[in-house]
Image (tube, rainbow, N blue to C red):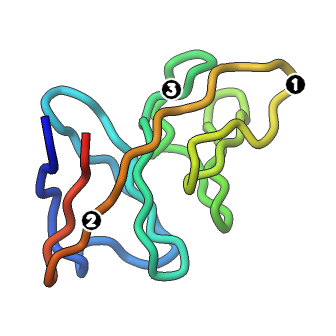
Amino acid sequence: MGKIIIGKTSDFVPGKMQKVTIDGKDILVANIDGMLYAINDTCTHAGASLSEGNLDGQIVTCGWHNAKFDCRTGKLAEFPVKVKDLNSYKVIIESENVFVEV
């Protein structure tokens, strides 16, 4: 598929996350200390939208059952049972344009 433009750097506020949709796939984009990271937005435990959860540093916590994932890697950080890690995607910034490589 390649790289898809998702906005401008000014669209992604430090310390915040937001959901973008690329070809029907929901992706969470988080600005962590000025660096942008992209992971699947759907929790692998029960399917909740992670962008509706909470971001604390680099950890997003699912609002349904408190599964915690690292936004930088998509890896499960904490949960009482093992669930699948999330896919992570390369974020590319060219000039002021932000792209996700899917």
Between residue 96 and residue 62, name the one nearer to us: 96
Q: Which mark is residue 92?
A: 2
| Disc 3 element | loop
Q: Position of residue 99 (x, y in %)?
A: 20, 59
Q: Which mark is residue 80?
A: 1
Amino acid carrying label 2: it is Ile
Q: Position of residue 10 (x, y in %)?
A: 24, 81
Q: Position of residue 28 (x, y in %)?
A: 39, 47
Q: Which mark is residue 48?
A: 3
Q: Please identify the quadrant where the N terminus is shown.
A: top left
Label whose residue precedes the other's in the sequence (2 or 1): 1
Q: How many marks?
A: 3
Distance of label 2 from label 3 (alpha carbons)? 26 Å
Distance of label 2 from label 1 (alpha carbons)? 34 Å
Q: Left or right of 49: which side holds 70? A: right
Label whose residue precedes the other's in the sequence (3 or 1): 3
Compared to 91, does 44 lie above or below?
Answer: above
Q: Position of residue 96 (x, y in %)?
A: 15, 81
Q: Which residue sits at x=34%, y=41%?
A: 27
